[in-house]
Structure formats: structure tokens, C-alpha cells
Image (cartoon, rainbow, N blue to C red):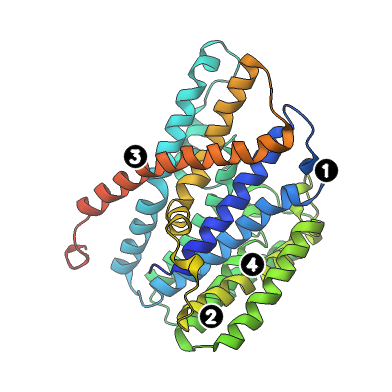
Amino acid sequence: MHLKSIQMLRGLGVLLVVYTHSIAQMGLFALSWQQRFPVGISMGTFGVDLFFVISGFIIYHTAHDLNGPAASLSFIWHRFRRINPPYYAAVLLTVVTWIPSLLRHQRPPLTGWQVLSWIILLPFPGNPARAFPQSWSLCFEWLFYLLFFLIIFFGIQRKAVALCLCLGSLALLGWLLRNELTGVLLFCTDPLLLEFLMGVFIGLIFRLYSPGKASALFLLVPGIVLGLLLMLTGYGDFIAVPAPQPPLRYLHAICWGSAAALIVAGCVFLEKNGTKGFILRHPLILLLGDASYSIYLFHMLVFGWLAAIYLRVGFFLNPDLAIPIHAAIAVAGSLLFYKWVEKPLLQWLRKSTPPRSARP
């Protein structure tokens, strides 16, 4: 499924993440005006919330009719094919940039356990260091995919109900045992999983009903207002707090997830009703949406290269001017990764995959 409104939201979400990381990187060189306000961190947080809701919506909408072991294997292969190869390519390029510091013993040597955690893309005991920090969200994506895989495998017809029970029970367990869970168990019961569930409910409504334009705007406008208020105030932004207490994590999932869900629902319902604004047809918006995964994966590597340049020649720009410039350079570099790595890689994998009727 290729909804233009979803591509628009993906492009918006990844721009929020990139800009936030650009602000954070500026802290290595100078103090900018933009670093003084919560929105500097909260924009990226909200971008990830949008991604989680979108994932729940897309996966449910495209795979709700799949049932049985063969269909479940096809589903998980398609998820692996879409997510992991570009991620592995980005990890490989990242590790290559580490070679000089590894040879000079300025960086701890890589361990097999660490590399294995990168390959499997799920949390590991001991929480080994990631290849790049933003990959934490991919672990949540894969946990959701595995739950959906099991639902398809066992042929459960009412997938929305099953996911509600699974994800709701995990979040409830995390709350009940909030003072006892650690490590992998803490991850598996994180309330952020509820954001995927919100996307699933949007997908269910999208398939069963056609809310009118007024209903869509009734969802979209409050979602935008709530999202802006949360970003401007940073209210409930647990990512900005080291080791947040469980109540803050649940507050975030409910408030920020709800704002993201309202925006996603409003946009997809407007498009379903035939509303096609200029922004949905603009080639740059669609390109950013198509390349959003590459931008998400690759932009931190570009920031690392920029930092290496400044370490050699010194920082010479106005901090507040440098932030959007760095963000634009990171997006441009990531678009090259999309054009030269992700897109050809996915095209090759699609050609090498047998037709659905020929799969086991």
C-alpha cells in the first residue's frame, strides 16, 4: 500500500528526528538558542511516535488477511527484506568509519556478542552498545512484527482483538511489575508498544468505515494542536530524562501516542475521502517519504563526518545557522544512500524473491 498521506507523515517524522539530532550535535561545539527549549529534543521524540503509529496501521492494513504458517513465513521474510538489509549496509559503513579509531585503540574493540545483537536487531542481555543510537526503535518494530507473525501463524482471524490482548497485557504487566523488571523483560513490556496498537485500531477503522471529511478534520486538527503543545512544552517526554520512572513512560505513550494517532487517522481518512492537497502531490515530499528509512538510518553517520571536519579545522559557523545547514546536509547525504544503496538493494531482493504462488 502506498498512501501519499503516509509518505508525507514519514517524511515529516524523519525530518523532526534529523533536526533534533542536529540540535543535539551542536552541543559538542557551541551553545545555540535552539538548545534552550524542550522542542529541540521533543521534535525527534514525536517523530518516532509517528513512526510507531504508522507501523501499526500499515502492518495491520496490509497483513490482516494473512493466515497460516506459509503466510506467516512470507510476512516475516518481507519484513526482514524491507528492514534489515539497508540497516546492515548502514552498520557496515558505520563500522568502516571506526577502523582508524579501532586501530589506534581509541574505541573499545568489537565483541561477538555486540555484533550478534546488531544482526538480530533485538535487545540482548547486558544491553551491548548499538552501532548507531537510533536503532533502538527498530528493536520495537521487530518485537511488533514477531507478535504479528505469531498471530498469522496460528491463523487468528480477529487480529485487532488478539493484538489488543497481547500488547495491552504486556503493557499492563510492565506496570504491575514496574519495580521488578529489568533488561529484556523491561523492553518487552514497554508502554510504547501501545502506540503500535493505536495504529492497528486506525487500520481497523480504515478498512471497515469511511469517515467523512468533517470527521477526519475533527481528528486531525486536535492532533496537530496537541502534538505542537507537547513538543513545545516537552510534557511527558521521557526520552529527555535519564532512566525515567514508569509513570512518565506510560504518560508519554498515552499522550504523545494519542496525538500521533489523531494526526495519522486524520490524514489517512482525508485521503480516503479523496482530499488531495498540493502537499500530497509534491515530488519532494513524496521523495522524503520514500527515502525516510534511509534518512533515519544514515543521517547520524553524516553528522559524524561533519564532527570530524570540525575537530580538524575548528567550528566556524553561527550555531543556530549551523543546525539547519547540518540537517540539510544530512538529508542530502542520506538521499544518496537511498539512491545508491537502499533502492538498488531492495530492487535486487524483490527480483530474487519467488512469486507468492511459488513460495512454500
Q: Residue at x 62, y 56 (%)?
A: 47
Q: Work out which residue is located at the far front of the displayed protein and give it.
A: 278
Residue 168: x %, y % from top left? 63, 72
Helix, strand or loop under label 4: helix
Pointer 4: residues within 10 angstroms few (<14), some, or many (20+)?
many
The numbered dot on residue 36 is: 1
Asked if disc 3 and disc 1 are in contact, CB closer than 8 Å, the reply is no
Asked if disc 4 and disc 3 are in contact, CB closer than 8 Å, the reply is no
The residue singled out by tag 2 in the image is 161
Q: Nearer the viewer, mark 4 or mark 3?
A: 3
Residue 279: x %, y % from top left? 51, 65
- The CA distance from mark 3 to mark 1 is 37 Å
Reading the chain from its start, which is encountered first: label 3 or label 2?
2
The residue singled out by tag 3 in the image is 340
Amino acid at circle 2 = Val
The numbered dot on residue 260 is: 4
Helix, strand or loop under label 3: helix
Q: Nearer the viewer, residue 357 or 233?
A: 233
Reading the chain from its start, which is encountered first: label 3 or label 1?
1
Residue 180: x %, y % from top left? 76, 54
